[in-house]
Amino acid sequence: MSTEAAPGNVIAENSAGRIVVASRVTRKLYPELGDGGDSLITMLMKVAEVEAASSNQGTIAGQRQHPANFAAMGRLILHNPYHSACVNAKKSSTIGLGFKSDKVPAVLDELTITDMTAVLNIVSEDFFSVGNGYLEVVRNGVGPDSEIVGLHPVPAAFTYVFDEGDGNWHYELLGTMGGFRDSRSNFKFPRFGDSERFVKKWGMPVEGRNTVSEIIHFSNGSALNKWYGLPNWMSAVSSIELMQALDQREFDFFINRGVPDFMLFISGTKASDEQWTELTNAMKAHIGIANAHKSLAMNFPDADVKIQLEKLDLEGTDQGARFATITDSLSLKIVSAHQVPPLLAGIQIAGKLAANNELPNAIRTFQLLTVAPAQEIFENRLERTLGNPKKNGRLFGARQQKMEFKAITDELDLLAMQALGGAKTPGAAVAKDAGAPVSAGGAAKPDGDAGSAGSAGDAGG
């Protein structure tokens, strides 16, 4: 027996005839993590190392490992449309509507390459994808009174906390000084407002430069790790992986030439090498989307030759509805883990098409339970850092600057009141009894930029 291997085919020949076995051909839609022996959630979490118990009484100094594979987690928005829609919905609702005060972007936009909302959109994408977002604050000098001259996003996948072991810490960006995963080659960042102490201990981050870059860390805190946050959607990873498997299976079905449509039997003669080659080449020529429904004609001179064509049922013709049901179930699990209304992820639930108030009610619940807590994290961190006159180089003068974001419920109220010819102030419809606009968190706050003394005195970073 002789065996000849051809791309996508194994041809075996013996005295009884020839058999062609079509091997599976595929195009990978999604990258693999590791050797494929573990589930996606296992691979994402395998990067984590067991850390010492959280304590500020002194720990072993060193770089603190991420609790999960942040780089792979961040790329999942490219692999699943529902996960991507949920991340974008939370990002747009939390940051995308901009600041309530026009004074904030007027000052901060000049410090960015584009504008502050675009920068925070990038930071918030990391925040919702991996549970951590980092903002670089470039100062023209050392100390809290030095001028702030730049604001830039820093990739969360490559930013690590370096625990100094004495209750202090700073941040490191991997491989930005000529190496990779070597603490000596990583670019070091002090946390916001800590550059004086940092420079005394570690020296200037870059010799010969007067500028110092500090880090503001936005963390979605988790009980699983002291140093890093984790996103809320991790329980949906298995659903995302299964949906990838369904997509890959359907994709392979249409491009895989190993999926048989029929079997051709030639009996009563042994085809010559020339005839066999002509037949196999002709069959291969029918592979591909552009070659479908073409005719094939061949001549066998033997009078006893019989050609039998057996049309095969398409594999899984009854599975289309089943796969659709599974996909619907998985998509709902993904949006549930994200705490995003299905409508905002493009999912229409049967039986609710006539509910005119379903979307507004869903948005209000979304604002209350998902968006407002995230806005609180960003607002508090920004007010204690960039809005703090004791640490922002008098960016906004001598007063504490509030950093409140617009809420989608405020915008809905504004549109409703404008449609009725009433109030034109966002939030006034629901806050008229309180006498003040409603904040993102749902509580009435007084107007003005001045913050509390306690907020101004909080430590940054």
Image (tube, grey):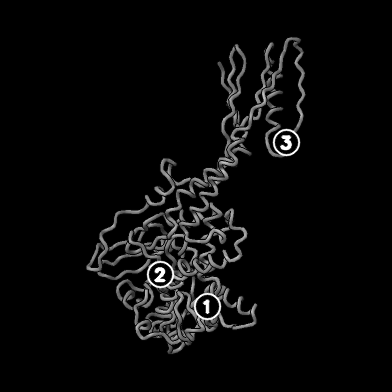
Q: Is residue 53 left or right of residue 33?
A: left
Q: Circle 3 sits on which residue?
A: 291
**In x, y percent, where is residue 319?**
58, 38
Q: Which residue is located at x 56 percent, y 18 percent? A: 2
Q: Where residue 340 sits in the image (x, y, percent)?
A: 50, 61
Q: Is residue 433 above or below residue 176?
A: below
Is 100 situated above or below 60?
below
Q: Secondary structure at mark 3?
A: helix
Residue 260 in picture, x, y percent from top left: 63, 29
Q: At label 2, which amino acid type do we have?
A: His
**What residue would you read off at disc 1?**
99
Q: Is residue 305 left or right of residue 360?
A: right
Which labelled disc corresponds to residue 382? none
Q: Determine the residue positioned at 30% across, 65% down.
A: 163
Question: Disc 2 designates what residue?
Answer: 217
Q: CA distance from mark 1 to mark 2?
A: 19 Å
